[in-house]
Image (cartoon, rainbow, N blue to C red):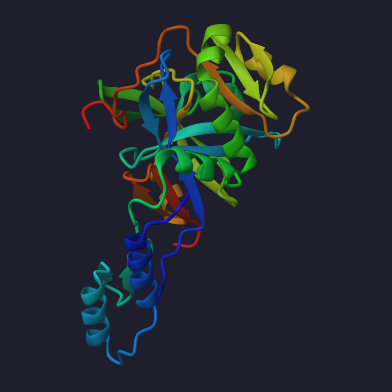
Amino acid sequence: MKVRKDFIRNLMKIIDSVPTEATSSKEILVHLDRLGIEWYVTKTGDLGIKYWQILSGFVSEEDAAVIRAECPSTPEGSQMDWLSENLQSIQERYAGQWIAIGNNAIIASALTLPELLTLIEDIDNPFITFIPSEPPIWSFTYGIKGF
Amino acid sequence: MVSKDFDHTVPFRQVTNAAGNIIARYPIVVATLIGPTGQRRNLPLLFDTGADVTTLIHTLYPLLGLHSWDEGIAEQSGTANGMTTVYRYMVDLELFGKFIRCPVHLSQGLQANPIFMGLLGRDTIFNEFGFGFWEITQDLYITANP
């Protein structure tokens, strides 16, 4: 995961932009413009700046996948991750059923939601979803097709 | 100077086909629905700035302690397929560490989908958070202190 020199130079430029010796609001805005930091002033007089800076080319997509996988996830996020990663096999096995997920496993399944709720009555915070029998439509609103 | 910092990051969830190719990526938020008896159930919801009200697939009505999906206040709602009748309820949700009482619609107009059971809409919820939708990094950034 070696970082290129031009990336380090860009990163230092952004870190150096944090302190400013400007003393007036106009000077601060000019300073931000000079550094390429996008800003806006709200109707109530607050200053908004783009706090996040995206620097491309930090690591490869493969390394990025490793780094992102190592980031701590919330319990709810873990349930969603597990469903997303195992969707193919879950669809094959549980089509037409309601399922409950906990601890990276299917903990219950049933043909109706009331039946499922009876099965998981004593379980805290299960993740619930329905696996349709028909193939879901993926290419609407946020689908990547047509991007 | 007010810094609009984000304190939660939700990566877009990707869906792959049998060949392993990515066919869709969605910003999915997991909300905890607190039922009338206090039972907590986690539901995946699609982050949707186009939804006025958080909308759930109608078959989830047992989670709200209802006997049928159409017991609530009938309202008309616009969908991709035209206007449809939805039913309005008030529910308790926990989202990113905040407890929120907000309206939800139950709708027959939502297509069943394994990775989201409804749409996370604006009413009440968007007042409680600030969102940064970052397509290029495939992340949704959230602050609970907007």
Q: Report the number of discs.
A: 0
Query: Image quadrant of residue A77?
Result: top right
Query: Image quadrant of residue A33?
Result: bottom left
Looking at this view, is A69 or A22 the one in front? A69
Image height check: is A80 above or below B52? above
Image height check: is B107 above or below A115? below
Looking at this view, is A20 or A118 the one in front? A20
Query: Image quadrant of residue B22?
Result: top left
- Apparent side of residue B98 relative to residue B131 in the rendered image (left or right): right
- Residue at 75% in and 29% down: A123
**Percent x, y of residue B37:** 71, 34
Looking at this view, is A31 or A14 the one in front? A14
In the rendered view of the protein, which quadrant contains the N terminus of chain B? bottom left
Image height check: is A14 above or below A126? below
Q: Is residue A23 visible?
A: yes
Q: Residue furthest right?
A: A122
- Residue at 35% in and 21% down: A138
- Apparent side of residue B51 relative to residue B127 in the rendered image (left or right): left
- Residue at 41% in and 38% down: B27
- Apparent side of residue A35 relative to residue A62 in the rendered image (left or right): left
- Apparent side of residue A2 relative to residue A44 in the rendered image (left or right): right
**Percent x, y of residue A53:** 35, 61
Q: Is residue B32 visible?
A: no
**Percent x, y of residue A93:** 58, 7
In the rendered view of the protein, which quadrant contains the C terminus of chain B? bottom left
Looking at this view, is B62 or A4 the one in front? A4
- Residue at 25% in and 69% down: A40
